[in-house]
Image: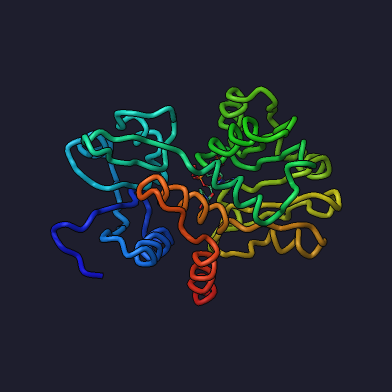
Amino acid sequence: MNVTGKTQVLALFGDPVAHSLSPQMQNAWIADHGIDAVYVALPVTGEDAAAFFFGLRSARLKGANITVPHKELAATAAHVTEERVANVLRWEPDGRISAFNTDGKGFLRALDDAAPGWRARVRNVLIIGAGGAAAGLAPTLEQNTAVKQIRIVNRTVGRAEAIVAMLSWGGVGLWQDLPTLFAEADLIINATTLGMSGAPSPPWPVSRCKPSAIVVDIVYRPLETPLLAAARARGLIAVDGLGMLIHQGALSFELWFGIRPDTAKARARLTQILEAET
Ligand code: NAP
């Protein structure tokens, strides 16, 4: 990589960002296409984050990804957006910033890859978690698929209620009812941090699942979480979080450069990085 004064700059803004695979993924695609650009991860912390995002209006980057906890702030700071929560910023030729959200679409594409035919049979969805990721997934599922019911279960019930309020087909479930909810669901999504390396994982009631159930864990470190291992052991379709990461990143790349990057190549590269960690 030969960085000069003309090199286009892209960044990941969030806190924390050091664990992110986005720099490896995006810089590899940038190299694949011989683009003069560089993608870096930049922690944005503390009370002045709002000033930082509004200050970006006077910067001239090529683009940015936004992660926890700044997705709402990023949407607010953009000149043009239809999103309440944004994970992509793009600087237009006139300097104005447009904001987008590719998380939901990335999730759908990952599921299309890993569980072809899922759209024809998934009607009842269980989402565990009500953080930023769940808030993006639930409306996307409702608006872009034939799903008829979305139950959201979260440790803090009020956050689940806030997401359900955005839905037409939604309802809040209780943690103690998980065995019944697992038994009813066609698609089960873990959108909490439970199961991440270093975080606990509860005894998920996977034994109650229908044989046709699809289980997704959007956590991707480790790739095989305890939830996915239990689902696979039961013979269910188990989908890891790497696909969502790659597809939201590919959609970001396309928004910045107008090129669809190679997602299969990204999966091979990132799997190698993750496997080297274990
Ligand atoms: P977030 O906004 O911080 O939300 C965290 C969620 O985890 C909340 O629902 C929280 O419940 C729950 N939680 C945390 N500790 C818990 C515990 N001990 N017991 C029960 N619930 C607990 O984070 P996020 O952005 O939604 O991300 C959630 C996960 O998805 C993270 O692991 C993240 O790495 C992953 N993710 C993956 C992708 C991808 O592309 N694959 C994209 C985005 C996120 P409370 O509301 O009760 O605190």
Quarter of the image containing the N terminus? bottom left
Q: Which residue is drawn at 64% across and 36% down?
A: 141
The image shows a total of numbered marks equal to 0
- Image quarter for residue 207? bottom right
Residue 278: x and y in percent read 54, 75
Q: Front-most of 230 and 166?
A: 166
Image height check: is 262 above or below 117?
below
Residue 8 at x, y percent in the picture: 23, 54
The residue lying toward the viewer, choosing from 5 and 211, is 5
Residue at position x 60%, y 32% in the image: 160
Q: Where is residue 12 in the image (x, y as percent from the top left)?
A: 34, 51
Q: Quadrant of residue 71?
A: top left
Residue 55 picture location, percent across and down: 20, 37
Determine the residue positioned at 57% across, 64% down. Answer: 222
Residue situated furthest left in the rendering: 5
Relative horizontal placement of residue 181, taking residue 96 as reference (left or right): right
Scheme by which the image is coloured: rainbow
Name the foreground residue: 260 vs 24. Answer: 260
- Give the vertical position of 94 relative to 192 (above or below): above
Q: Is residue 249 left or right of residue 194?
A: left
Residue under the image location 83 percent in, 50 percent down = 212
